[in-house]
Image (cartoon, rainbow, N blue to C red):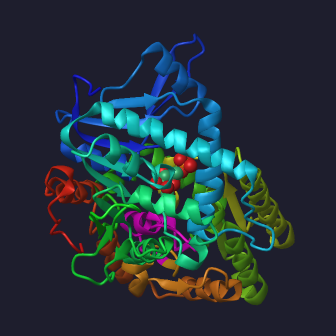
Amino acid sequence: MVSERAAQVLVASNRGPVTYAFREDGTLDARRGGGGLVSGLSAIGTDADALWVCAALGDGDREAVRRGVAEPGVRMLDIDATVHADAYNGIANSVLWFVHHMLYQTPLEPVFDAQFRRQWDAYRTYNRAFADALAAESAPGAVVMIQDYHLALAPGMLRELRPDLRIGHFSHTPWAPPEYFRMLPDDVAEELVRGMLGADRLGFLTWRWASAFMQCAGNVAEDGRIVSSAPDDPRPRIRHSPTGESAFRTTLVGVHGLGAEAGFLRRRSHELDVEERMVALRDQVGGEGDRKTIVRVDRTELSKNIVRGLLAFRTLLDERPEWRERVVHVAFAYPSRQDLPVYRDYTAEVARLSEEINAQYGTPGWTPVVLHVKDDFARSLAAYRIADVALVNPIRDGMNLVAKEIPVVSDAGCALVLSREAGAYEELGDEAIVVNPYDVTGTAAALHQALTMPDGERAERTKRLAAAATALPPQQWFLEQLHALEALGEGGEEADDLGRT
Ligand code: F6P
């Protein structure tokens, strides 16, 4: 049944824009989060009939749903905790994330066994809960924008319930190349692709990820019932029909390279708390202003490659003794997905290696690695402002917004050492010092090159990096997708003329 207050624009994602925590007196404290999607959605204003559907994640969120506490424009789904854990930790984070970021140590993993099948069922149930809620909350012909690998089946499920809707799906991650994607059991690979193809339009952060999806789609159905156009077609699309049906539908493919929000970042990075943290950080770096800084800011996420970054820094100190006492690696590694043992082990390895480097090289007046693990946005901005070099070396990354934010905020210019496997490489590669993220020796050489870049060149490159980084700010990123979906007739019949963006 469609709700009486049906929305015209809906966003769906696992993590929503608000979380609830218990206060000491048992009441609930709502905290609003940030990020590209929150900022993007603000483009349509608070008066619009918009609704964000998300999952209740912690006990506070679940209690909020039970007490009927809700922020305007947000609907949290209280999905059974075991189903959510199996879908989120079991499938989304331990399988799909690993596939798209190519993280498996393949001699031993993945193993698709009975446990995987049970979790896959949970993933279906979780996607179904979203599809049901979206179907109930959407006005006739509404636009629904579904986010990420958590919700790859929801577009197909929603289309069955509400063929009148205009459904988009956006991937914030890379997409796996076909050889890697085919590690998934065949039926699961096809179900994922067909789930996504329930959308009228699929969005990706770069053409590299979009074409990987198109190749996977063309590959999973052996009977030729899913056909991708060439990715360089002026209007990339995929034609598909379910087995046993003769009618084909078309799903369009578009690319929207989410950029940094210059105004907000520049304003926020000059607030008092940031200035205070700059003083504290400079104090930790020491050297009376003569020391250089190599800054990295990441969630402690397996694909971010923090450990090889530390190894590269150690190689720099090994091979170029002239840098000892003259440079500090400021590494912010904020814990993420700590329910998963492999993430906890990785976090511990980052701390262990930092300590080892400090023990090996540190002197009474110099701590080579300054590691912070407590998430502090103001301190991240402070580090952005003082960075001489930014190290962004992921194994694979959908975009990497840190690479885009640092040049925008940097005070005196910052040389960017950037992995060619980050989505941001497509837009920033020309002005960055580009590295193969597995090549520790090469990364150490790139750090040296960055540290010795002349000030004038660094400042000029930073300007050009900032211009490229802000080409598509979050609000425009969101509106581009919204307008492309609105341009479709009900049920997605008309072609989108956005093509390449
Ligand atoms: O960075 C890619 C991304 O998929 C984001 O879109 C999303 O917010 C995040 O990863 C998911 O992280 P988490 O598991 O912490 O919610």
Residue ID at (52%, 39%): 126
Residue ID at (60%, 41%): 122
The single residue placed furthest to the top in the displayed view is 25
Residue 291 shown left or right of residue 468 in the figure: right
Taking depth in this image into account, of 24 and 53 the one nearest to the observer is 53
| Residue 207, image x, y percentages | 37, 76
Taking depth in this image into account, of 269 and 100 the one nearest to the observer is 100
Q: Quadrant of the C terminus?
A: bottom left
Query: Is-magenta flag for residue 465?
Result: no
The magenta segment = 386-415
Q: Is residue 194 above or below residue 146?
A: below
| Residue 144, image x, y percentages | 29, 46
Residue ID at (42%, 83%): 429
Q: Quadrant of the N terminus?
A: top left
Query: Is-magenta flag for residue 409?
Result: yes
User: Would you say residue 159 is visible in this rendering?
Assistant: yes
Residue 501 shown left or right of residue 54 in the figure: left
User: Would you say residue 395 is visible in this rendering?
Assistant: no
Taking depth in this image into account, of 98 and 22 the one nearest to the observer is 98
